[in-house]
Amino acid sequence: MNEDYLISRKRIFSATLFVVIAILLSKLSGLARDQIMAGFFGLNYDVDAFTWAYFIPNLFRVLFAESLIVAAFIPIYSLYLKKKRYEDAKIFVSSMANIMLILFVVIAAVIFILSPQIGMLLSGISGNNMDITKFVVMNRIMIFSLVLLSLSGLATGILNSHNIFTIPSLAPFMLNVVTIICVVFLFRDLGIYSMALGVMIGSVLHLAIQFPQLKASKLVYRPVIDFKHKGIKEIFSLMFPILLSLGAVQLNNSVDNFFALNLGGGNTTALTLSWRVANLPLGVFSVAVVTVLYPLLSRQAAENNIEGIKESFSLGIREIGYVMVPASCGLVILSYPVIKVLFEHYNFGPQDTARVSFILIFHSLGLVFFGLLMILNRIFYSFKNVRTPLKVAGVSILINLLLDWILVKFMDAGGLALSTTLVAIFNVAALLVILRKNIGELGAVRIIRSYYKILVSSAIMSGVVYIVWRYASFYAYRNLFWLIGTLAGTIILGGGVYVGITVLLKMDEVRFVINILGGRRSGTPGDGK
């Protein structure tokens, strides 16, 4: 157990350094893509048409390529590798690839045909303001990207099972860069359609970049589908509960977007932009932690190593809190200047900045809970327990719908973001209670001690950032150069204050980072070193 624990910690802060860099590049390129889209096209119903057209193939990518592959494929495939059942693994992977290829081609074809009907539905919700033709054209351009991105997700699952993380993490970077290039060079001729074309071309590279490293798996593709294979049967037994559970999360997002679409032009996109900014720290650090921990959790669950799972859970939940709590505080205080720097240019005006920054405040409040939810869901999935997250997610649908209906009346799109945060808090609380009931004490004392120090450090940091920005803002808004410099200086100062205080408080989390950077091995778990 101690060896696994030390390996996981070293991976998160050293071997995973490349993963963090790759994810950071992907998130920054995604922000750059959003900057270009907002600047070139503004916040209006045309951009909402693209947002919805992309939402549909992206929905299937999230459900199948990310969620199903992570929750079901990786544990099964990892077990075959652990038991050295390589022939079974080859048949399992080939069958899985062929099933996904056929299934998604059919789904894409159906959505391609029904695009006009989907467009009419969305336009009706918007008060007949959204251009149906533009939605249909962009949806049909991008819809077959779900085939490529789903197969790419399968490739990512294979590589992650072999402890290869960096290249798969760079795949979204390629998609974003290609989209940016298409918009910059083609927007004058194609307008908003250039975004859709960039997504489709980028999806090809998203898959192609991972092919060379698949050689490390020593898998050989076979044109077979073995429905009697034990692994395939297990995938099908887990698939529907997982999709219903994770589909509930996506249904919540869809409900939010429907409410936003009814609020007027650009609100769906404003909600999306806010989430992507909030998702930068969440996606970079939390995803890196979960990416590395999940194969370990799957192995520990296969071995029924409950103590090891508790150690991994404690590690993940504390490290996520160490980064997400101060990030949340910083984004709440600096939401307006952050959005102004990122997006306010060309067709994106001050009123758009105010709209998105208001939404960002409420998305930011949930960062730590979004991160904790990633860990909790993966623990249940590692035990192949998909029913518990499903039941909790089902209740969350009703809560989200009720909160959206109430809060949107008082807070517009900001209420939708707050609803998302409150639902995440409910999910985390419910899953924690159930997990503790199932496997016993989760090391609450150690976790609470860490979070107490994190909260104290974040509170002091927040006070410093608030005071500094209150006076610095008098000079920051002179021009963009002053704004960028002042904002960057404030963020660096706040981060330095936070890290400095956590060092003074002798937090294990920050001391481990220092040890890794210094090339020294941390002590064993529980030794206090």
Image (cartoon, grey):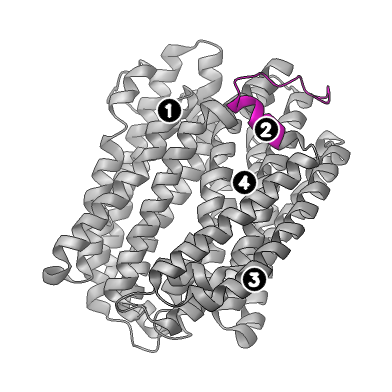
Q: Is residue 290 positioned above or below 57 on the image?
A: above
Asked whether 483 or 232 is in front, the reply is: 483
Amino acid identity at mark 1: Ile
Judge whether residue 300 can be spotted in this image.
yes
Q: How far across and down, in percent of the image, does residue 480 sit?
A: 39, 71
Examine the structure image and report whether residue 521 is included in the region drawn in magenta. Answer: yes
The reply to whether residue 397 is visible in this rendering is no
Q: Mark 4 against mark 1, which lies toward the viewer?
A: 4
Classify residue 420 as left or right of residue 525.
left
Magenta-tinted stretch: 510-529
At horizontal 46% and vertical 24% (from top left) the residue drawn is 229
Res 158 label: 1
| Spot occupied by residue 460 in the image (x, y as percentages of width and height) | 76, 58
Please give the residue where the numbered disc 4 appears in the rendered image.
Answer: 374
Q: Is residue 294 magenta?
A: no
Does label 4 or label 2 sit earlier along the sequence?
Answer: 4
Q: Earlier in the sequence, mark 1 or mark 2?
A: 1
Query: Residue under circle 3?
Result: 419
Residue 509 placement, left or right of 172: right
Mark toward the start of the polypeptide (3 vs 1): 1
Would you place residue 255 above or below residue 438 in this image?
A: below
* SS at mark 2 in the image: loop
Q: Amino acid at mark 4?
A: Met
